Image: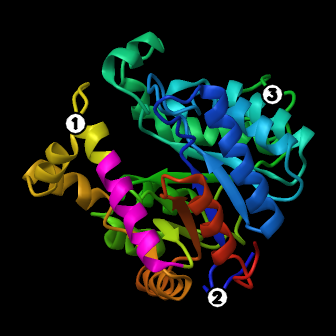
């Protein structure tokens, strides 16, 4: 899908579960958003693997992708991403090969190197953290299973073999940019919460991209995806109030340490160095009218030469989330 922004627009759904809401209600809300994005013609919607987080419902990422894909018609659905060190490449190839078999031409597989959780939970996953050291080898092994060119003699992924599920490298540092360039794969940068290295990572990826060594073949071309938070409303002040509420929610989550913070506490923390650090994580955020946000997104995309924008619908209220989808759609008049 194209809008007044020249780059394709896609969505990353953080599958949040609100306070007082059941996990089932949170998933149902994600489905409604995905169905609206599908109707409006957006390119793709991704979900990310996290563990031991009571307000995130995407831990079993492949199952959530299946649920969303089964209730939508055209939009690509994928992982943004699967934390590959938590899994055997063969198992992920089988899972996403199954998804591609069920929903042909609609499945994406983004891959991250972080565990998506804390150290204690990592041990509960039967991992010790050293698995990340073999990330490149695991990506190559996974690619072999999906392309039908297994790098492990006598071992193939069924389903998965020959499905060619597209792979994306995810990251928030130069490591991912360098690896994606070396393997000739698309690269998505998590600037929606880790913006510090965005420009450097974007230039590193493009300058070092190697088609000759690409897992996709010699015709591969760089494809850089930059992430940003957005809130759009007919009333710009409503969008900006939603941004403030979202920022306060981040401060509560990251600095509350298990206790409920009052509004006065949050206001104080906004000016504290710790609060400023949290707000800095959300610096790649646009909130306002359709015209304001589209202009911001175009400048953002042009600054880092993004081929695609992966947007996070930051508004706390579902009604505003849907209006954000509507107003960023191609004609800006859906509703």
Placement of 196 over or under 45, stated as above or below: below
Q: Which residues are magenta?
A: 235-249
Question: Magenta part mainly helix, strand or loop?
Answer: helix
Point out residue 67 in the picture as x, y percentages from the top left corner: 79, 36
Numbered circles on residues, count:
3
Q: Which residue is mark 3?
A: 156
Instruction: State the quadrant of the N terminus.
Output: bottom right
Q: Which residue is mark 1?
A: 261
Instruction: State the quadrant of the C terminus.
Output: bottom right
Q: Residue at x 80, y 28 (%)?
A: 157
- Neighbourhood count class around disc 3 (C-alpha, 10 Å): few under 14, some 14–19, many 20 upward: many
> Callout 2: helix, strand or loop?
loop
Q: Are marks 1 and 3 in contact (CB under 8 Å)?
A: no
Q: Quadrant of residue 87?
A: top right
> Which of the two discs, 2 and 1, labels the residue nearer the N terminus?
2
Point out residue 280 in the picture as x, y percentages from the top left corner: 24, 61
Looking at this view, is 267 or 77 the one in front?
267
Q: Is 34 situated left or right of 250 in this image? A: right
The reply to whether the magenta stretch includes residue 274 is: no
Q: Is 199 situated left or right of 219 in this image? A: left
Point out residue 172 in the picture as x, y percentages from the top left corner: 38, 54
Disc 2 versus disc 1: distance between alpha carbons?
40 Å
Q: Which residue is mark 2?
A: 4
The tag on residue 194 is none
> Which of the two discs, 1 and 3, labels the residue nearer the N terminus?
3
């Amino acid at each position: 899908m194209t809008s007044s922004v020249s780059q394709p627009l896609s969505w990353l759904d953080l599958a949040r579960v609100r306070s007082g809401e059941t996990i089932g209600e949170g998933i149902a809300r994600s489905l409604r958003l995905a169905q609206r994005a599908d109707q409006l013609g957006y390119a793709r919607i991704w979900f990310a693997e996290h563990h031991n987080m009571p307000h995130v419902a995407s831990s079993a990422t492949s199952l959530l992708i299946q649920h969303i894909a089964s209730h939508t018609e055209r939009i690509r659905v994928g992982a943004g991403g699967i934390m590959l060190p938590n899994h055997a490449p063969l198992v992920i190839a089988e899972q996403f090969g199954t998804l591609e078999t069920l929903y042909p031409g609609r499945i994406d597989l983004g891959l991250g190197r972080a565990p998506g959780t804390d150290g204690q939970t990592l041990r509960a996953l039967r991992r010790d953290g050293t698995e990340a050291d073999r990330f490149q080898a695991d990506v190559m092994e996974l690619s072999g299973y999906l392309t039908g060119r297994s790098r492990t003699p006598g071992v193939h992924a069924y389903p998965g073999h020959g499905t060619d599920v597209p792979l994306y490298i995810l990251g928030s540092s130069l490591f991912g940019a360098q690896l994606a360039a070396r393997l000739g794969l698309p690269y998505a940068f998590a600037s929606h919460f880790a913006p510090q290295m965005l420009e450097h990572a974007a230039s590193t990826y493009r300058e070092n991209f190697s088609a000759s060594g690409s897992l996709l073949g010699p015709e591969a071309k760089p494809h850089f995806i930059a992430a940003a938070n957005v809130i759009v409303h007919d009333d710009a002040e409503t969008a900006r109030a939603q941004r403030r509420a979202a920022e306060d929610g981040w401060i509560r989550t990251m600095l509350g340490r298990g206790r409920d913070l009052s509004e006065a506490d949050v206001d104080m923390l906004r000016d504290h160095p710790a609060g400023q650090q949290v707000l800095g994580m959300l610096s790649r955020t646009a909130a306002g009218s359709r015209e304001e946000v589209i202009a911001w997104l175009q400048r953002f995309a042009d600054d880092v030469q993004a081929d695609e924008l992966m947007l996070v619908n930051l508004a706390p209220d579902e009604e505003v989330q849907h209006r954000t989808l509507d107003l960023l759609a191609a004609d800006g008049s859906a509703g």
